[in-house]
Each structure stands twice: as C-alpha cells, then as structure tokens.
Amino acid sequence: MISKEQISADYQLIQDEICAALEQVDGKAKFEQELWEREGGGGGRTRIIQNGNIFEKGGVNFSAVHGQLSENMKKALQVESDDFFATGVSIVIHPNHPMVPIIHMNIRYFEMPSSFGGENKPIRWFGGGIDLTPHYIIDDDAWYFHNSLKAVCDTYYHDFYHRFKLWADDYFFIKHRNETRGIGGIFYDRLTANDDDLSWDTIFEFSKVLGRSFIPVYTELVERNRNKQFTPQQQEWQYQRRSRYTEFNLVYDAGTKFGLETNGRIESILMSLPPTAKWLYNYQAAAGSEEERTLQLLKKGINWAE
C-alpha cells in the first residue's frame, strides 16, 4: 500500500506543474503563495492568481491536514474514529472572458485508523473529479471536454466515465434552482482498492493522471475562446452565471463544508468564489437568445461524449 506521505508529495508536484503551466497560458499574472498551518494538525500551500490577461481570479491549493473530526463530520462520514488524515489539490479558475468557462478540479485522499462499527481496520479512499461551468455552452467545447475525460477514464476501467459522469450530474446540481451548475464532468468519492478489483496503485495512478489532464484540456478551451469579441451584455450574463456558482459552493459543496467543519483556513476554502457576481432580481433570458439556450442545457442526463 502506497503511503500517505508519497500521495501527499505527488500531489504537491502536480500543484507545481499546474501553476507553472497556468502562468504560461495567462502570460501576465503570477501565482502568489501563502503557506499556512492548521490548528489541530497539518497545513497547506494556497496559491492564488489574479488580474491576469485571461484569469481574473484562480486558486490552485494543496493541503495535507490531520487531527480529530467534529461530531458533525463523523456523522456525515459515517465513522466512529476521531482521527483523520486528508490531502489533496483543489483548483477553481474564474476567467475574465465570458466565452472562457469556469473550471474546477479536485483530487484527494482520505484516511482514518478504524472503520465504522469499531473494527480494528483502517479505512481509506480516493476522491476527485473535474467539472466545467461555461457561461455560454458551446457544443464543440462540451464534446471536447467530456471526451477528454472519457479517454482518461477508459484507460483505467471501462465503466468509470459512465458512473462518474452520472455522479457529477447529481452532485453539481443546484436543487433550489432546479439546474446543474454547468455541463458537469466526472465526480467520484470513496474509491477504494475493493472496487472493481482495482489495486491501490491503479487508483492512485488514475488520480494523478486525472490531475495532470487538467492543463491540456483547459489550455485548449482557453485558446479556443480567449480572442473572441464580447459585449457588455455578455459580461453581465457572466456575472449572473457566477452567482449560481457561488450559490452552489456555499450551500451544497462538500469540500467547503469539510473545510469549515475541520477548522480549515477560511481564505483557502473560499478561494473558489468569483471576484464579481451579480444577483439580478427575477432575471428572464430573452426568447431565442444564447442565454436562454444555455439555461435549457443546464440539466442532467445530456450525453456530451461519443
């Protein structure tokens, strides 16, 4: 079994690679780093990029924390042990261009010394995923994004993409709006070596390859759209769509809840929020507009992959 120290070290390397590549894509802004320690155990590296040529605000964060879970988190995770270890990389990028999509990625590992029911056996799992939130849904971009993820999934297990895509549709869903956050992607949690007869090494490799798929996939989407012209009205729509992103992250996102419940660093947890968002009262998209078309596609079950 690969150690938690090795997992943590490899995740830090992935953070380094992604930050260097995003700086190159932007061409102007550089990441600022803040090292932090968590009261109770562990810490992380928060890296923020702002006011760039294309990236208005983004974060590529690494953390490795340990300590004791609150009673609320123990109930939520259905575990009895207090002690835990968690490490991962979390990314959210908010571009300044309404035709360039918001993207989120997370790869993570969680470990506890004993399982639910008091059995003297450690529990551990991997989780993660990538999802895309376009301000305007562009079919070719959606097909490219989903087929790229499918190619990664198919390399490791034939059913990963289908299962994880459905999981993403259900997870990234704004219930009070009855709409998905974007066009989804893949999402998985509690993936262990007991699932599908996969080894721990295979699951860990899948986690790393998924993490490293972020740069080629997102770079392609940025370059396709960054030089398109846009109107002030389209930017207003971008701010409106950002408000939906904010609502999801504050109301439903499990990572936000975990960070707050485990006394994580607030600035790092909330780096996912956009710099500017607007809540227009009772906004109605014009009939036949691209805005209306986007709203009609924010639903579960759309097959974007071949």
Image (tube, rainbow, N blue to C red):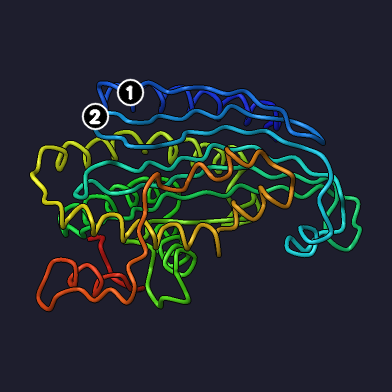
Q: Is mark 1 on a helix, strand or loop?
A: loop
Between residue 71 and residue 229, name the one nearer to us: 229
Measure how far apart labels 2 and 1 are at the Cα level. 7 Å
Between 242 and 12, the residue placed more toward the observer is 242
Quadrant location of residue 295? bottom left
Identify the disc placed on residue 29.
Answer: 1
* Three-letter code, disc 2: Asn
Quadrant placement of the C terminus: bottom left
Q: What residue type is labelled 1?
A: Ala
Percent across and percent down for residue 158 are 41, 56
Q: In which quarter of the image is residue 278?
A: bottom left
In the picture, measured across the screen, residue 118 lies left or right of residue 210, that is right
Q: Is residue 55 left or right of residue 224?
A: right
For this rendering, which residue is in front, 38 or 200? 38
Vertical order, 258 against 207 (above or below): below
Instruction: Residue under label 2, please give it.
Output: 53
Residue under the point 41% across and 28% down = 18
Q: Quadrant of the N terminus?
A: top right
Query: Crowding at label 2, few (<14), some or many (≥20) Cα neighbours within 10 Å?
Result: some
* SS category of the residue bearing label 2: loop
Disc 1 crowd, CA 10 A, few/some/many (<14, 14-19, 20+) = many
Q: Is residue 290 left or right of residue 62?
A: left
Residue beneath the point at 57% across and 32% down = 62
Name the foreground residue: 108 vs 133: 133
Residue beneath the point at 82% across and 54% down? 70
Q: Is residue 305 above or below residue 19?
A: below
Compared with residue 240, is residue 128 higher up or lower down, i.e. above or below? above
